[in-house]
Amino acid sequence: MSDGSSFYITTPIFYVNDVPHIGHAYTEVAADVLARWHRQAGDDTWFLTGTDEHGQKILRTATANGVTPKEWADRLVETAWQPLLATIDISNDDFIRTTDKRHEVNVQLFLQRLFDAGYIYTGDYEGSYCVGCEEYKQPGDLVDGTGQYEGQQVCAIHSKPVELLQERNYFFRMSDFTQPLLDLYEKNPLFIQPESVRNEIVAFVGRGLTDLSISRQSFDWGIKVPWDDSHVVYVWFDALLNYITAAGYGADDAQFERLWPATHIVGKDIARFHAVIWPAMLMAAGLEVPKQVFGHGWLLVGGEKMSKSKLTGIAPNQITDTFGSDAFRYYFMSAINFGQDGSFSWEDLSARYQSELANGFGNLASRVVAMVLRYFDGAIPDAATLAPADETVLALERRVTSEADEAIGRLAIHEALASIWQLVDGLNGYITEQEPWALAKNPEQRERLQAVLSTAVHGVGTLAVLLSPVIPEATTKLWQALGGVGEITAVPVTRAFEWQSAGRVEPLEPLFPRVETIDGAA
């Protein structure tokens, strides 16, 4: 898959009106796994994440807490959003805040260029606005309220009443891009994925686009419109531009040319912003559209989308404090088909931790290292002659490496892990069949024992390399125990089976210790 080209990947920039939950962390981990894989494949990789700090929702939240919007944003970024990245072992190259000067200045530059090109005009707008989404809603986006909101129209996502707003705003001529966008979708079917999200977007644009209100006058927490400081830029128009302002747009042309375009990983509920408004903005500015927009599914708890406002939000550290960051990362990447909705439960997490990580992979690694220590005093044996069973394992290593790499190229992280797990299961079965403990009892079988443990060690090392983008902490420990040469991240993941050892193993503590209780499950 790798050709040494640029791979620029982004998460959405997350709204700082509240602390992160595992839905946010899910997106971060997915992007991180893809970034780590591409780095280890030799691609010029850049991974961006960050926070969205303007808009009416932030202003109201800050006011309710008795601080300025900037004070609120600073507090949340410092105490919650940046610590999240350490909690789940995220390897981002950059972290952008929409209050950064580098962002604000170049948002104004972009907007001025669109204004000068005739894509922006003034007009009056009246519509139903959801502050939670920071979006004007069409009638089809509203549902009848229940409970305290019975008799009112509410946002289908937030289940809260919308507000009727009437303002004189600046508008972006988005209607000019209905046909260019449809042409884009037809020419590049992979531009929007998965297929379910693509179909929804194509149908939406096919009905015809209206022009987009891109400024607000009723409050002042935002980036000023450069030619009229009585207006602030609409928060989504501002936020989407982070992907190019962080990449050097307006400030570093060489970096921007090297990095852009990006692959955007977003939740499906905001795919429309990224696959409709965003490419239209870029087309208007004469810039290349993103490489791809991938709208993954929701994390569901009790059948509902993860939400702080509905009290279904689970803090990532509730999981990592008990199971560790590797288990968090592995579980959400393997248990959910990336692109579809997935239900979280403590019981499923605990069961998979025990069966797949502790017993499946962790126990395999421990057994192999322990047998080399016991039967060969830590020296990894050479295989003088390989039997068909050994050759089968070596062939499996190559096959799963290829399959996993191909799946990552399609952003099918769950399929990549399923392929890699064939090697976990294959090695466990191989050891059961070959019975090295029985071979060790017979001096005449010494050469066969050497071949079996040589093959097993090699397979476990290949697993360490393949899994390092997903479970970096455990695989680093395993790599050290296997005497891996150099840093594990320096071994090309696309040729994981070519890894090398210095020739000796060291004792290995359990990679996934037994978990007796599940904190937070009650």
Image (spheres, rainbow, N blue to C red):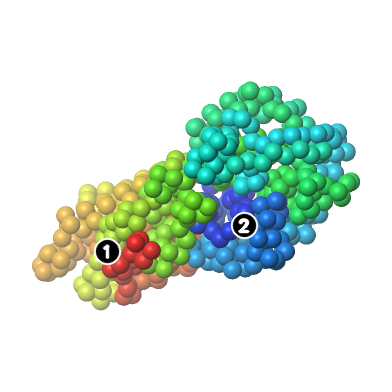
| Rendered residue at 40%/56% (across/down) | 330
| Three-letter code, disc 2 | Asn
Instruction: Identify the residue under disc 2.
Output: 17
Q: SS of the residue at dot 2?
A: loop
Q: Nearer the viewer, mark 1 or mark 2?
A: 2
Note whether 276 is above or below 69 in the view shown: above
Closer to the chain start, of discs 1 and 2, is: 2
Quadrant in which residue 380 is drawn: bottom left
- In the rendered view of the protein, which quadrant contains the C terminus? bottom left
Q: Left or right: where does residue 20 sit relative to residue 174? A: left
Q: Which of 235 and 156 is in front in this view?
A: 156
Mark 2 surroundings within 10 Å by alpha-carbon count, few (fewer than 14), some (14 through 19), many (20 or more): many
Q: Left or right: where does residue 347 sit relative to residue 108? A: left
Q: Which of 226 and 312 is in front in this view?
A: 312
| Three-letter code, disc 1 | Asn
Q: SS of the residue at dot 1?
A: helix
